[in-house]
């Protein structure tokens, strides 16, 4: 191809032209460099409720897919999976950036769906300064990663001890809980803006089994898996996403099984204006925190009576009934409570299960109806028809609600709206009870699509938060994440003994603070 001929300018004109262009480019570069990184991060991003994705090519934008971003109330959020919830309202969103001139972009608020196999940058930074004994933070124009070590501000206690007998830790040592279900570590952090935050722990798990923790923060819950690291001196990181409120937040990591938690080196949170908060009198050393963290007056005050057992209503379908294992999760839940010295009983019009558990008479009552749906649909009876009587005849103090599995096959559309109507009726009919609403356990049956379960579960936390903001006694517990498929399912749909035990541990962690 022949070379393109330049116009017949003089060499002086060509040199001046290039010089002029170079000056303009430099000026433009300087101007752009002075702009906040958040300007780039938010530029061209839709603002809620202008959704970026459609269900079908000719449809109306109505959701976000994994990786899609939306601006909401001046903040930039990224979807963790398919979602049509309000950004920051549930765990389907992660906070990425501010969209003002005082913030810079960050990649540290990435989400975690399972345990991480490699150390994060914050872990690497801290492992190089093992003599550090207080919390630290790194920031850039408001973007902060706070790291909380043992015996420092924000570390409020451990049901166990702070040890230093295994190498590789940072700070003063590591938090080592007693090996029992429900044993916990407590931190306190302050965040400037409500939203979904990524929480991360550096840990070692030298046992042969993976260990699972339950995160509780202001009534919302999530799970985090701590895979085995092969040795107690081998450290890695794992994390999860949790919705936090603006201001102080108590972060409680509880053991979901009798294996206990792994050894925890430090806890870190990336975000904007995140800081460690004073523990308001909680012990920041070791096992002396145990009594305060097991207080019988939780976020909703005195839920259970001071005298006599706490009356718990297990409410739902065949999984509550205990299909395949008569008594279901209620067996393990009662045993955990007995071993912890807590007094509980189950109420409801139905009864099944063993006669004794842990050497004590087993309260066999429940309100689980095999094959029933949320409301009466497609020829099936809804559990809502049992309200207020006979379900509430025994005036329950705590109601454990796991419902919706049969709706997957009967009528999957509108499940979340039916659940909200059921929740509203319970809250009105039993205003003094604590309602614990669970996400569904997973399904391995094609006739009960797990994809619908995921979509249904994703909508529950936002609904629960809405009711909490209205002043109702209601919390969410995640019964889905951490559930092993198919090893914890008896028939692809109902839990086996191991699955029911996992459910029991999660129920117990959510209500332990209210029991006597």
Image (cartoon, rainbow, N blue to C red):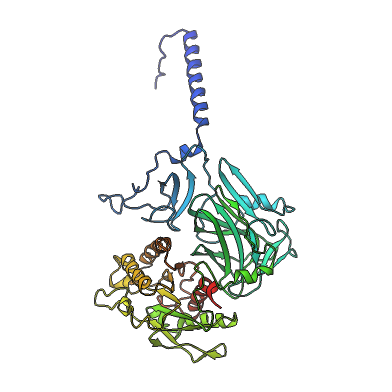
Residue 426, quarter of the rendered image: bottom left
Q: Position of residue 410 (x, y in %)?
A: 28, 73
Q: Nearer the viewer, residue 57 or 69?
A: 69
Residue at x 45%, y 46% (from the top left corner): 76
Side of 7 relative to 179 (left or right)? left
Q: Is residue 384 above or below residue 16?
A: below
- Asked whether, in this view, residue 202 is left or right of residue 389, the answer is right
Residue 204 visible in the current orientation: no
Residue 508 to residue 351: above or below:
above
Q: Which quadrant, please, contains the C terminus?
A: bottom right
Across and down, in percent, residue 192 comes to 52, 49
**Residue at 50% over, 20% down:** 22
Q: Is residue 292 left or right of residue 496?
A: right
Near-viewer residue (480 or 375): 375
Q: Quadrant of the N terminus?
A: top left
Q: Residue at x 29, y 65 (%)?
A: 414
Which of these two is toward me, 274 or 388?
388
| Residue 431 visible in the shown view | yes
* Image spot of residue 510 (x, y percent): 51, 71
Q: Say which quarter of the image contains residue 163.
A: bottom right
Question: How many marks are shown on the rendered structure?
Answer: 0
Q: Position of residue 61 (x, y in %)?
A: 30, 49
């Amino acid at each position: 191809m022949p070379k393109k001929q330049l116009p017949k300018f003089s060499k002086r004109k060509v040199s001046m032209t290039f010089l002029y262009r170079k000056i303009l480019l430099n000026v433009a570069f300087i101007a752009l460099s002075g702009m906040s990184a958040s300007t780039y991060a938010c530029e061209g991003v839709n603002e809620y409720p202008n959704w970026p994705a459609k269900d079908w090519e000719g449809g109306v934008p109505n959701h976000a897919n994994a990786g899609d971003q939306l601006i909401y109330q001046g903040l930039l959020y990224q979807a963790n999976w398919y979602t049509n919830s309000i950004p920051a309202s549930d765990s389907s969103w992660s906070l990425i950036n501010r969209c003002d001139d005082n913030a810079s972009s960050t990649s540290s608020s990435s989400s975690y769906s399972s345990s991480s196999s490699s150390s994060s940058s914050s872990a690497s930074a801290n492992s190089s300064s093992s003599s550090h004994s207080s919390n630290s933070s790194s920031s850039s124009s408001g973007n902060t990663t706070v790291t909380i070590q043992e015996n420092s501000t924000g570390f409020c206690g451990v049901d166990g001890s702070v040890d230093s007998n295994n190498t590789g830790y940072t700070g003063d040592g590591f938090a080592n809980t007693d090996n029992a279900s429900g044993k916990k570590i407590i931190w306190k952090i302050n965040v400037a803006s409500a939203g979904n935050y990524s929480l991360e722990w550096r840990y070692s798990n030298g046992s042969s089994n993976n260990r699972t923790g339950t995160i509780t923060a202001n009534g919302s819950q999530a799970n985090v898996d701590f895979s085995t690291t092969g040795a107690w001196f081998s450290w890695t990181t794992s994390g999860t996403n949790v919705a936090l409120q603006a201001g102080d937040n108590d972060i409680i990591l509880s053991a979901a099984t009798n294996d206990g938690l792994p050894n925890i080196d430090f806890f870190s949170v990336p975000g904007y204006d995140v800081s460690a908060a004073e523990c308001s009198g909680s012990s920041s050393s070791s096992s002396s925190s145990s009594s305060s963290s097991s207080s019988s007056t939780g976020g909703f005050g005195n839920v259970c009576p001071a005298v006599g057992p706490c009356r718990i209503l297990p409410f739902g379908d065949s999984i509550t009934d205990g299909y395949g294992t008569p008594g279901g999760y209620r067996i393990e839940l009662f045993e955990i409570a007995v071993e912890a010295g807590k007094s509980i009983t189950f109420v409801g019009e139905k009864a099944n299960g063993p006669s004794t558990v842990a050497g004590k008479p087993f309260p066999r009552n429940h309100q689980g109806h095999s094959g029933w749906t949320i409301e009466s649909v497609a020829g099936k009876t809804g559990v809502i028809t049992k309200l207020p009587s006979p379900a509430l005849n025994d005036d329950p103090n705590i109601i454990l609600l796991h419902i919706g599995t049969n709706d997957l096959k009967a009528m999957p559309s509108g499940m979340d709206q039916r659940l909200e109507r059921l929740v509203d009726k319970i809250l009105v009919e039993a205003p003094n009870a604590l309602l614990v609403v669970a996400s569904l356990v997973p399904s391995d049956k094609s006739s009960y699509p797990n994809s619908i379960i995921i979509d249904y579960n994703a909508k529950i936390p936002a609904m629960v938060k809405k009711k909490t903001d209205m002043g109702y006694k209601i919390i969410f517990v995640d019964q889905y994440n951490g559930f092993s498929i198919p090893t914890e399912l008896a028939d692809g749909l109902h839990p086996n003994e191991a699955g029911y035990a996992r459910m029991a541990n999660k129920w117990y962690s959510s209500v332990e603070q209210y029991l006597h």
